[in-house]
Image: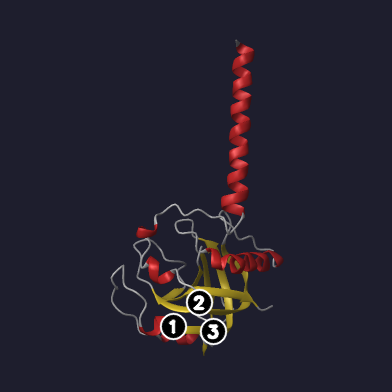
Amino acid sequence: MLKTTWSRLLVLVGLLALIALNWSCGTLKDICNCLPYEPDIADYRHAAKHVPLPNATPVEITVQTILSWRQTPVLPPTMPRFGRELTLFHVAHAFLQNASVNLADCDVHLEISATADPRAPRVIVETPVDSEYCSARRSIQKQLAQHGFTLDGTHGGDLPQALPAEVTGLAFEDFEHPQNRGTAEVATLWELHPAIVTITQ
């Protein structure tokens, strides 16, 4: 009887370990295999954010330009893209300060600034969970790893040292979430979302 109980317990422990390993290597480690824990309907202006980047020549701007954009009152949660949000932008010179995976929606959350100063005002940049952005997500993960920084579902945050980067993406105006949208240095509701970030160093 005792032997049977121990055998069952060992099988159960083995199964739990296998499940945990699969979950760790899949959902968390593979940045393209993240499963959001919140439904799409809980995501503000979800349909507007989850679009492909247009095949167009981007307009060159700076981080300072984004920080200067006028912010508007809260938009309806189903508001489609309009105005500036329809334009593809390119920031040639920025500094990547922060990188993480938001497990609520699985988007890669990045913060950029105009200078390498960690206290400089920041802009949020996001690469969505959508399959068309998988290669961009894996690319930024690999580039960060080459600089000794781990980006996955359990690792992220401020980089030890800001890294020069460029960004291509669509403008998007978010709202001030009841919970923190990012670090205290984020200085605008405007984002580049969806966007692709490339480390240039």
In this image, 3 relative to 49: left or right? right
Residue located at (50% from left, 84% from top)? 89
Mark 3 vs mark 2, foreground winner is 2
Say which element carries label 1: helix
Residue at screen point 63% across, 49% down: 25
Q: Image quadrant for the N terminus?
A: top right
Q: Quadrant of residue 41?
A: bottom left
CA neighbours of label 1 inside 10 A, class few (<14), some (14 to 19), many (20+): many
**SS for dot 2:** loop
Sequence order check, earlier mark of 3 and 2: 2
Q: CA distance from mark 3 to mark 1?
A: 14 Å
Tell me, yes or no, if residue 189 can be seen here. Answer: no
Q: Is residue 86 visible?
A: yes
Query: Mark 3 or 1 closer to N-term?
Result: 1
Q: Amino acid at mark 3?
A: His
Compared to residue 81, the image places residue 36 above or below, namely: above
Q: Is residue 39 left or right of residue 74?
A: right
- Name the spot of residue 145 as percent of width and height, x first: 68, 64
- Residue assigned mark 2: 53
Amino acid type at image mark 2: Leu
Is label 3 in a helix, a strand or a loop? Answer: strand
**Residue 194 image position (x, y, % from top left):** 48, 73
Q: CA distance from mark 1 to mark 2?
A: 22 Å
Q: Which residue is painted at 44% across and 76% down in the image?
A: 191
Q: Residue at x 57, y 78 (%)?
A: 117
